[in-house]
Structure formats: C-alpha cells, structure tokens
C-alpha cells in the first residue's frame, strides 16, 4: 500500500471514530390532551413547523392523549410504541400531574423530561445537539420533583 493510500485510510478511520453518533435512536413522547389549551395550541402551531424539519424527520414522535389531572397514563391506554417505556416514564414523571409533559428518549433511556411546551426551533436545537454530538440546549431532567423543579438532573455531558 502506498503512502497516500495509508494517509487516506488513517484519516478516514480518525474522522469516523471522532464523528458524533448519528445513528442515535430518538423518540419524542408528547403527552397532553384536548382539555389542555397549551397542548392544543402547540399541536396547531408548533407541530406543523416541526414536522417539516429534517431533525424531526429522523426521530420517532408519539402523541399520547392524557388529561391535565393525570400523570403518565396507565399502560393499557398508551400507544404500543410507548408501552415499553412505561416504567421509565413513570419514574421520570415521579407522579407529578399536569399537561403537557414530554420525554425525549435516546437509545431506550429517558434523556430529558419536562413540563410545558417548547417551540419547533427549540426541538430542532435539541435534536441536532443529540445527532451532532453537541451541547444540549437545556438542563436535562431525569426525574421531576414538580412541574417547575427537577429532582434529578442529568450530569453535564
């Protein structure tokens, strides 16, 4: 093998090893219902923008219908693609009620759990950070204390 081929192969291996993990399995679970005005507004205004974004198209998205006065719905009422995460969602929600609630699940683990709405631009920034291996734009919460407070924050990446 000549020197140029060796340098080319070494560079390819180096950049492949240094590249962010673009093959992350990302699942967004958004929980809210028609009794929740912010949920209805988010579905009408932000979700259509989000659906056009490339970062969102790479992720899986599941909307879970739930009442404001509940936490994560019972297993029987969850869509089939969310049922495997029921215990993890329950642990992250920590029994806190309210809507909307959302979870970002990466490679089968809760990566962030929050209450309230985020804009399409914020979702895009979150997803791009994960796919591109960059700093996540929010403090990540793994377990809620209340709607406004996180009980267990994720360590800085």
Image (tube, helix red, strand yellow):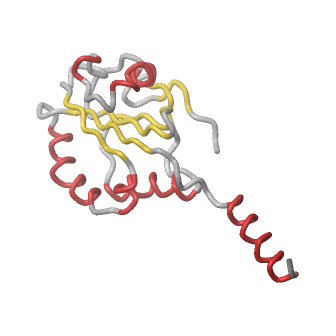
Q: Residue at x 16, y 47 (%)?
A: 41
Q: Position of residue 118 (x, y in %)?
A: 33, 48
Q: Residue at x 80, y 79 (%)?
A: 5
Q: Quadrant of the C terminus?
A: top right
Q: Position of residue 94 (x, y in %)?
A: 42, 18
For residue 122, say whether it is visible. Answer: no
Q: In which image quadrant can residue 2 be found?
A: bottom right
Image height of 91 relative to 117, above or below: above
Q: How many marks?
A: 0
Q: Residue at x 45, y 52 (%)?
A: 126
Q: Nearer the viewer, residue 63 or 17?
A: 17
Q: Residue at x 16, y 34 (%)?
A: 36
Q: Nearer the viewer, residue 66 or 99?
A: 66
Q: Position of residue 143 (x, y in %)?
A: 48, 25
Pick out the residue farthest to the left: 34
Image height of 150 relative to 26, above or below: above
Q: Quadrant of the N terminus?
A: bottom right
Q: In which image quadrant can residue 85 be found?
A: top left
Q: Position of residue 16 (x, y in %)?
A: 68, 62
Q: For this view, does 62 lie left or right of residue 130? A: left
Q: Nearer the viewer, residue 15 or 51?
A: 15
For residue 138, say whether it is visible. Answer: yes
Q: For this view, does 70 lie left or right of residue 156? A: left
Image height of 111 relative to 50, above or below: above
Image height of 18 relative to 144, above or below: below
């Amino acid at each position: 093998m000549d020197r140029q081929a060796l340098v080319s192969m070494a560079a390819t291996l180096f950049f492949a090893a240094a590249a962010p993990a673009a093959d992350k399995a990302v699942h967004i679970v958004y929980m809210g219902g028609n009794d929740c005005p912010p949920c209805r507004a988010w579905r009408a205004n932000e979700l259509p923008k989000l659906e056009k974004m490339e970062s969102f198209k790479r992720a899986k998205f599941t909307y879970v219908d739930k009442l404001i006065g509940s936490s994560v719905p019972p297993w029987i009422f969850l869509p089939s693609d969310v049922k495997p995460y029921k215990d993890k969602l329950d642990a992250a929600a920590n029994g806190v009620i309210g809507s909307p609630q959302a979870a970002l699940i990466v490679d089968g683990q809760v990566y962030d759990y929050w209450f309230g709405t985020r804009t399409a631009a914020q979702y895009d920034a979150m997803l791009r950070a994960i796919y591109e291996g960059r700093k996540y734009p929010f403090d990540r919460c793994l377990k809620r204390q209340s709607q406004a407070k996180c009980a267990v924050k994720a360590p800085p990446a």
